[in-house]
Image (cartoon, rainbow, N blue to C red):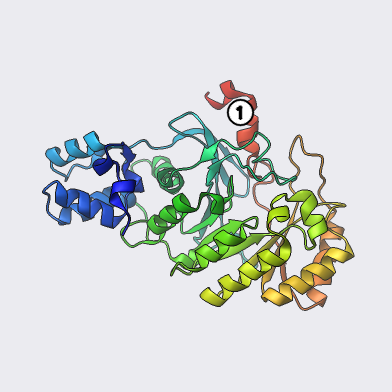
Amino acid sequence: MSDIGNNTGALSGEPRELRSLNADEAGRILVEWGHKSYRVTQLLGWLYKKRAGSIDEMTDLPKGLRDQLAGAFFLKPLELAKEQRSRDGTVKFLWRLADGELIESVLIPASIGRDGSQSDRHTLCVSSQVGCAYGCKFCASGLMGYKRNLDAYEIVDQVLAVERWQLTKDGDAPKQEALVNNIVMMGMGEPLANYANLTRALEIFNSPWGLNIGARKITVSTSGLAPQIRQLAETPQQYHLAISLHGATDDVRDKIMPINRKYPLEELISACEAYQQAKGRMIWVEYILIDGINTGLDQVEALGCLAKRLQCKVNLIPYNPVDGIGLKRPSDEAVGRFRDALYQRGIRVTVRIEKGTDIDAACGQLRLKSEKQPTAARS
């Protein structure tokens, strides 16, 4: 159970967003206010199942309770500042936060199978920070610097806002099952650098009283914060862990990912082994292929050794060029050679099927353009 005195606005005197509450906290607050326990289920249902955008919508709660909630908490949904739709069904959202900052989420439909079928899987790529402080040389998220961590409710409401968006699209159609059934913490920011708010959001995503998304359908990505990987390993949930590696030697990684100077590869891989031992789950390694930087045979050899040590799957991602960053995408032939060389070494390897190539799909691109053109973002 969380420390209510430190975390709950209702008891500390500091306003707090309702959607950062977990079941234990909501229960303690409503009991202290003199309400029956079943009101907790109703409140959590309005927040996380019915995706309420205001306290007034919670019509089966007594007006006295609604007034108490409004006096102690606030409910401020994300504002949709801009939306981009790709021909392949990918949708990128630019959200405006209560303080005017901008963040992004990307809704990715399942790919069409070889037999022409398509599953109902929809993955949402979720942001954890406004900007990023880690300065990876290939990424748009950090180009305008780090602003702040997202609160737990700002992480959670990215999913709820997409569900509300879907209902708006459907108009008066009957209420559907949740659209988002997979979550990847791979948006703007370094998730593990916002550990407390991340894990609170993951609890809400995963819990039956929350969004009820299975832990095996939730992936946390990190650029390599080894101590937090070990910390996450101690949690009971079976979340997927994805490592944004992008360089298989310290020399290459130092050049494009400053975090490697603090947590070199040996320290990172050791933390990953601890995570595997605790969870018994395969780790995914994400590897963006950047022309002339990390596509050489030396990287194939080193990446093959790391992958065998971790018994992991390698996901190759051809670089998506970003305005203002002078890095290039390798040719399709170079991508194929790198993939085949890993495969010949017995590594499980895939090349990510690209989505949203006709929109600003890379992390931070849409925010970057909108920050440079604030008037357009608000139109």
* Tally of numbered discs: 1
Specify few, some or many for label 1: CA neighbours under 10 Å numbering under 14, 14-19, or 20 or more.
some
Residue 56: quarter of image: top left
Could you say which is closer to the camera, residue 190 or residue 332?
A: 190
- The residue that appears at 61% across and 42% down in the rendered structure is 132
Q: Is residue 213 left or right of residue 229?
A: left
Q: Which amino acid does the dot numbered 1 rest on?
A: Glu
Residue 339 appears at what percent x and percent y?
A: 79, 67
Residue 107 appears at what percent x and percent y?
A: 54, 49
Could you say which is closer to the camera, residue 134 or residue 283?
A: 134
Where disc 1 sits, the SS reads: helix
Residue 136 appears at what percent x and percent y?
A: 71, 47
Residue 240 appears at what percent x and percent y?
A: 54, 66
Identify the residue position indicated by label 1 in the image: 371
Residue projecting furthest to the top: 375
- The residue that appears at 27% across and 57% down in the rendered structure is 24
Q: Is residue 98 left or right of residue 93?
A: left
Q: Is residue 88 left or right of residue 328?
A: left
Residue 51 in sight from this viewpoint: no
- The residue that appears at 78% across and 72% down in the rendered structure is 304
Residue 181 in sight from this viewpoint: yes
